[in-house]
Amino acid sequence: MMQSTLRKVLDKAALWSRINSPWLVHFNSGSCNGCDIEILATLAPRYDLERFGVKLQGSPRHADVLICTGPVTRLARERLLRTYEQMPVPKFVIAVGSCSITGGAFHGCYNIVGDIGDVIPVDVYVPGCPPRPEAIIDGVVQLLTKLKGAVPARARTAETPFGGAE
Amino acid sequence: MSGESAFSGIQDGVGPWISSSRAPADNRLDMDTSAEHLVGAVTAFNALKWGYLSAITGFDSGTAAPSDGHIEVLYHFCRGPSVATFRVKLPREDPSVPSIGPLVPSAVMYERELSETMGVNVAGLPGRKRQFLSDDWPEKVYPLRKDFTMESAAATHAEAPTVGGEDEPGTFIIPIGPQHPALKEPGHFELAVDGEIVTHANIRLGYVHRGIEKGAEDRSWVHNIYLMERICGICSHIHATAYVLGVESLAGVAVPPRAQAVRTIFCELERIHSHLLWLGVAAHQAGFDTLFMYSWRDRETVMDLLEELSGNRVNYSVNLLGGVKYDIVGKAADSIRRGLDFLERRLKRYLKIVTTDESFLRRTRGVGTITFDEANRLGTIGPTARASGVSRDLRVEAPYMAYRDFPVVPVLDSRCDLEARFVVRINELFESCRLTREILNRMPAGELSVPAPRKVPEGEVISRVEAPRGELFYYIRSTGGAKPDRVKVRTPSLCNWAAVLSVAVGHKLADIPMIMVGIDPCFSCNDRSITLRRRGAPGGVPGALEQWSWEDLRQYGIKYYAGGGR
């Protein structure tokens, strides 16, 4: 009983800190760089995503949110999965750009295996070719809003994309 | 320089090796040769010191009548506006050419691409590693052949991964990428190090290989403008421009001067945004984040201008076949002038920073030197070449669009190091600002576009433009239909890789990100490594190699910490 109360308090604290300072890791799985430079512009002084506590992080092992761009190419597929696997649970995915949703302009090209959603579970899609920085900010804020009501401890892996047993 | 005089002497030099030659356009010379005579022709051609290898194109004529079913390989050498091409016709069954890599070092990357995508066996090509297609891509399936189907690519082929193989014994390999924090193309690099010093550098491309050249063959001429624009999101306009210029010249469409001027202004604004982006990212690699933040803040000025003119920040979709969509008038022109005034003030400050800041200079001065001769030999282009004193700028040498009426002053630097690459790019921005202002002041009057046909007459064309990163090469071939038969794109970054990989050797590992970013792709380090240790302990065999498995590493860690970190 005592333990579960402590657990609840800890979970609450973890969720609070996660919402107030999510760390992002970026992966380009075949994008044209258009979305990538807009993500970077979102973090630069004009749009300043960092004011929401968001930090772009180099290593997937330190990140809460994977921000993906582009369709998934045949070679990048395995790396995208591996990057996702390396992130600690709970983990969340934002897919930025039209081609991350449907393949976009590259639909039907031979080296495209699909969109981001075909490979890893996606929480928020941000459409646009490329989306404006405001749209990317909105995507992040939507994810954070979603987190407020979420139970964070469910393990999600590529094998059980929509959550396994607790 | 007229077409004929530019090519004088070539036929005499390579005469014995070619079977016939013709001039399809004023600035072009096509020479037919055969696979046996290719090496001889290129050797003789090299001796003339005429120009540099710009691209290698392969196309499949297909088996449908009236074609006789062959594969043709084209070696394009360029000097200024002139293009000399060696054409080699090969049978579709088992086509093979010798590698010209020993003669022209920059050819290796193009030959690798040719052999993977077109299925031409390039004899003597070093290494068997794939560079563009994935490791599980089926054998003997070549996507750019006309008989390629998506079903044939669905099969997988199990082979040892091409990363992490072929290591020299006794070296420590540091793999970098493809996921890395610097937010650009995911390339994979393998750096062999001896202590801090890099002894060998290797690259694996293909993480963003999408198959656009094949995709273009399934799309209409108009549809392709939008596909080409999405080859690169940073220099999107210049890709679309190179494509439409080529198609317009095939179709014989004369684009009105005002449309050309608008295109040119967009090209220059794009160059400003691209170079400022690069400046920020390069500063970030040096650990100078303040400059990164400043240059990205100021870059928003030009992004605002692009948005005001076209409605979009990144893919502006300015080009039509036969003209442009947007005009630049009154208020918009004034905002461009205001924006440029502001940027010029800022650029002066940046120039001062990169040439005087002591700690920054320690990362750039005398680092990553590519000498004039090296830059020539390795076929570098764009600002990378110009920072080594090699004057290669198509806006100057082969003016196109409005550059004919508004000449560009080339920016050169002879110091050859990273500092020179910073200085050249910033000075180019001053030139871009001046040029844009001049075009705005003397904007030609007239129409914005003329109608273009839906079908493009049979023929082939080479379209070359100066992208922010260097010469961009398009080869477009039409068979008279509503879709192109072949679109070959050679992007500037591919040319510069050879230079970077050879320059990296001998530098400290910490300088590598700066050197890589010097040509304008960028990346930072990642945290995975393959450990090869030379065991010299008394218990082991001296000099024997031991590869550590993950389990070994784990056990080592447990023991290490169990002993209190000792």
Image (spheres, coloured by chain):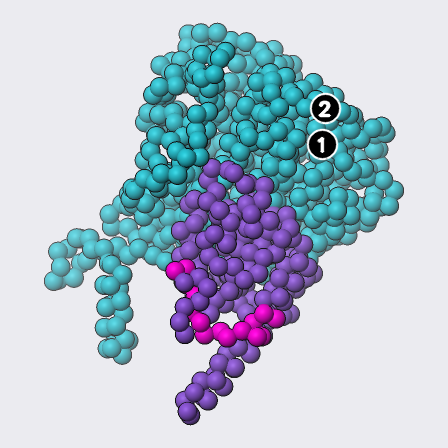
Looking at the rendered image, the quarter that the N terminus of chain B falls into is top right
Q: Is residue A148 magenta?
A: yes
Q: Position of residue B54 (x, y in %)?
A: 51, 27
Taken as a whole, is the magenta stretch helix, strand or loop?
Answer: loop
> Which quadrant of the structure image shows residue B112?
top left
User: Measuring 47% from the left and 52% from the top, which residue is drawn there?
Assistant: A118
Q: Is residue B129 visible?
A: yes
Real-space CA distance between mark 2 and mark 1, rounded to the nearest whole angstrom = 9 Å
Q: Is residue A48 magenta?
A: no
Q: Earlier in the sequence, mark 2 or mark 1?
A: 1
Q: Which residues are magenta?
A: A145-159
Q: Label 1 is found on which chain of the structure?
A: B
* Chain that is coloured purple in the picture: A
Foreground residue, B274 or B463?
B463
Looking at the rendered image, the quarter that the C terminus of chain B falls into is bottom left
B165 is higher (above) or lower (below) than B380: below
Foreground residue, B15 or B25?
B25
* Chain that is coloured cyan in the picture: B
Three-letter amino acid code at the position of disc 1? Leu
User: Measuring 12% from the left and 62% from the top, which residue is drawn there?
Assistant: B538
Q: Position of residue A96 (x, y in %)?
A: 58, 54
> Which quadrant of the structure image shows residue A16?
bottom right
> Which quadrant of the structure image shows residue A84?
bottom left
Q: What label sits on residue B320 in the rendered view?
A: 1
Mark 2: give few (<14), some (14-19) or many (20+) Cα within 10 Å.
some
Foreground residue, B497 or B288?
B497
Question: Label 2: which residue?
Answer: B452
Q: Position of residue B448 (x, y in %)?
A: 80, 31
